[in-house]
Image: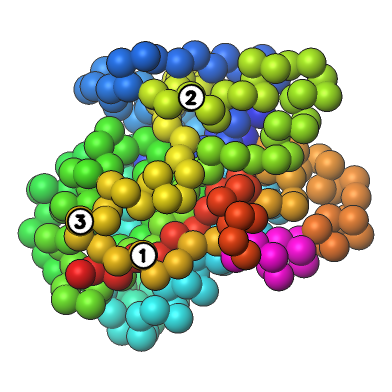
Amino acid sequence: MNGEHELGQRTLETAMLPAPAPGMTSRRDASGSLDEVRLLDTQRAFDSVAADYDGPRGNNELIQRMRPALWGAVCRELPAGGRLLDLGCGTGLDAVEFAQRGYQVVATDWSPRMVARTQLRAAAAGMEGRVATAHLGIQQLDRLDDAFDGIYSNLGPLNCAPDLHVVAAECARLLRPGGRLAFSVIGRICPWELVHYSRRGRWRRAGVRAARGVTAVGMNHHTIWTRYYLPREFYRAFAGHFVLAGYRALGLFLPPPYLVDYYRRHPRRCGFLGRLDDRLGALPLLRDMGDHFLIVMRRR
């Protein structure tokens, strides 16, 4: 499910749940539940942007810079030739990338139009034999009966999952012994976002990620229902089935993707900030902040 939540990214997709852009609304739900109606809201939102999601909304330069972090993590943890499950595949950028690197991929998404885009991308790349697709939400993993070496999700789909404890149990069921999880998740503490909106006196917007329940984020006249996490907070839902291998910040010194205009205006400055991200993003304390975090877990 990956922008000001210029959300560009998928249904449970891969591109990233960004924060609401100017004119977008964000409201909190005290109950903390994601029911069927909200899941359908999220599905419609990503369906509505599927046709142009590979453009600035879901794959701008800052998103492109974050995306390969997960590719590297998966390739370090799992040898080519393994079977991977993609949760929230979006338009299939990650699935085709892994297929081209020698993996077999089952790409799933809650948005049928995103799944259709993935099918077209795989066909265009000649990867139909390595990429299978399924219209399947993260909340529907119990419908799968298969075995995988790794499960990944890039740039925010798991922020839209109704119950992470259920996801953890299903991932453990689907993974072979020694299998790995690699997830890129939207974080709770984004220094850039706090500074950006606080300087403009938009205090409520600056603190939107502090919401403990479900938060409604507008995209393309639709609503995406999401949650924000600290890395350790996220891991607690998986701790019964998985051992934490490590995590790092993504987009800590660089601005979040919905501020891509700043990145384009200041390429040299942002090049330096990107190098800081790469060198310092895994350090204690710093790794708990950032627009996203990348977390890797090993099946117990």
Q: Is residue 79 above or below residue 187?
A: below
**Residue 10 appears anywhere in the view:** no
Q: Where residue 244 is drawn, which disc sits there?
A: 1
**How far is mark 2 from mark 1, CA to CA?**
25 Å
Residue under numbered circle 2? 211
Element carrying mark 3: loop
Q: Which residue is mark 3?
A: 240
Amino acid on which disc 3 is placed? Gly
Q: Position of residue 199 (x, y in %)?
A: 83, 24
Residue 141: give x, y in percent of width and height.
Answer: 17, 48
| Whether label 3 touches label 1, CB < 8 Å | no
User: Residue at (46%, 20%) from the top-left corner?
Assistant: 216
Asked which quadrant contains residue 75, the reply is bottom left
What range is drawn magenta here? 274-282
Considering only order in the chain, which callout, 1 or 2, is on the residue closer to the N terminus?
A: 2
Where is residue 291? Give x, y as percent: 61, 45
Task: Report whether 45 appears left or right of 178.
Answer: right
Q: Secondary structure at mark 2?
A: loop
Please state, as top left, top right, bottom left or bottom right, where the N terminus lies in the image: top left
What's under tag 1, amino acid-wise? Leu
Task: Give the residue at x 59% y 39%.
Answer: 189
Q: Main secondary structure of the magenta part?
A: helix
- Within 10 Å of the Cα at label 2, are there few (<14), some (14-19), or many (20+) other Cα atoms? some
**Real-space Cα separation, disc 3 to disc 1, in angstroms:** 11 Å
